[in-house]
Image: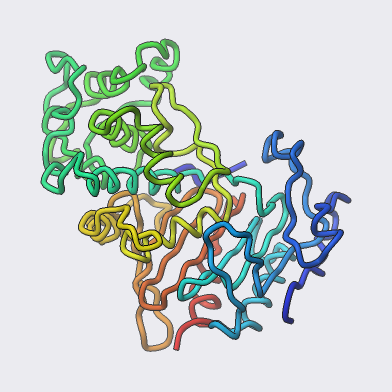
Amino acid sequence: MTINLKFKRVIAVVLLGGMSSFVAASAEDSADLAPEATAAEAQISFWDMPFLKKAYIDTTPADRKDGIAVGELGVDGGNKNKIVMLAQEIADSRHGGYDSLLIAHKGKLLFESYYQRARVNLPHFQSSTTKSYTSLALGRAIQMGYLTMADLDKPLVSFLKDLDPTTFVDGAEKITLHQALIMSSGIRISDEQREEFEKTPSRLKGQGEVQAFLESSAPITAKSQIFKYGGGQSNLVMQVIEAVVPGTAKAFIKNELLDKMGISNYRWQTGVSGLPEAGQRVSMTSRAMVKWGTLVINKGKWQGEQLISADYLAKATSSVTKATEDWHPKNFFYGYFWYQTNITIGDKNYDANLAWGGGGQRIITVAELDLIIVITGADDADTIMTQVSKIILPAFAK
């Protein structure tokens, strides 16, 4: 993950001093409507979006007929005063540069807020949260029978038939899908080698990307197969999805996940291999992120249909290995492109699962509280987990 990156209805009165004079038309015309990007704004770079003049803070989110049930904060759960106070502090930039905060509880969206460049209909870059979506796509392939749980422990190259193993470095043929999913493949590619790859992108088309990794890496050994965060390992997983599903991975993700959840407003870019990006360069609206969180908290079900293998999801969201990069909090563990941590509130502990991307992108699920927290941002320090632990969870804990 790249860490550094460039009281009833609506409370939309928190001024963002010194910001652009632009105000989303829908927010200005009616305080009951969340700010929306215009058709023209939807075409420009996220970084060129003008800042909202007023933060939008809503304790009774509107039913947008998008498959998300809604309710009222305080009535259907949660401490309204605590959450609204936090939202006002975010609007005042007291906790960093964040773009949205949404909270769903017991199957209903109870709180929705937008700041800075965010709009309700504007897909927000996801950074490494993309990896978590890639993991769920693999779980969908397992649910549909294109892979089995036993396949996770098979050599990854056994699924890829266009490779030339005679040029692999020692140990490359032993890397399992499981090891790639927990960032423990052992592949080590230097920055200089990556720069060389970029000079001949045609070499990386299709399974050429995997070929380049496995013949250019340092030898794969038991010593090297320890947790080391790196985006290339999610690319390996996407290659397997492409190899085992009918058609293409792009069509599979669209037809079998996005369409089924009613997610049509998104951007999923194509990588140099020609496959969908697996570790970054995806954009989702904040409400779409709530849907992904709902899929996880419902053990892989969406509106009663089992989309993700329950066995796979249980493994993916378990503490398989320790997250050991120096920027990882000490109490963070890693599953299949999903983080796990334990949050203490008073004398009680709560297990939380996280999809986490640099700059502040998060989907946080706390099963015991039936709670989903979605956060987007563009914040270098990215310290919002402090407020999640001290304010949001206590607002919903019994």
Q: Residue furthest right?
A: 21
Location of residue 325 in the rendering, given as x and y in whole percent from the top left corner: 36, 50
Q: Is residue 264 left or right of residue 140?
A: right
Residue 226 higher or lower than 101, as above or below: above
The answer to whether 21 appears left or right of 238 in the picture is right
Work out whether 37 lies above or below 391.
above
Estimate the x, y position of residue 248 in percent, counting from the top left: 34, 28
Question: Which residue occupies the foreground of this view, 317 or 29?
Answer: 29
**Residue 293 visible in the snapshot:** yes
Q: Is residue 329 visible?
A: no
In the image shown, does 351 or 228 lie closer to the viewer?
Answer: 351
Colour scheme shown:
rainbow
Q: Quarter of the image containing the N terminus?
A: top left
**Residue at the image point whose x is 43% and y is 62% from the top:** 294
Q: Tell which of 179 and 228 is nearer to you.
A: 179
Give the total of numbered labels: 0
**Res 151 → quadrant:** top left
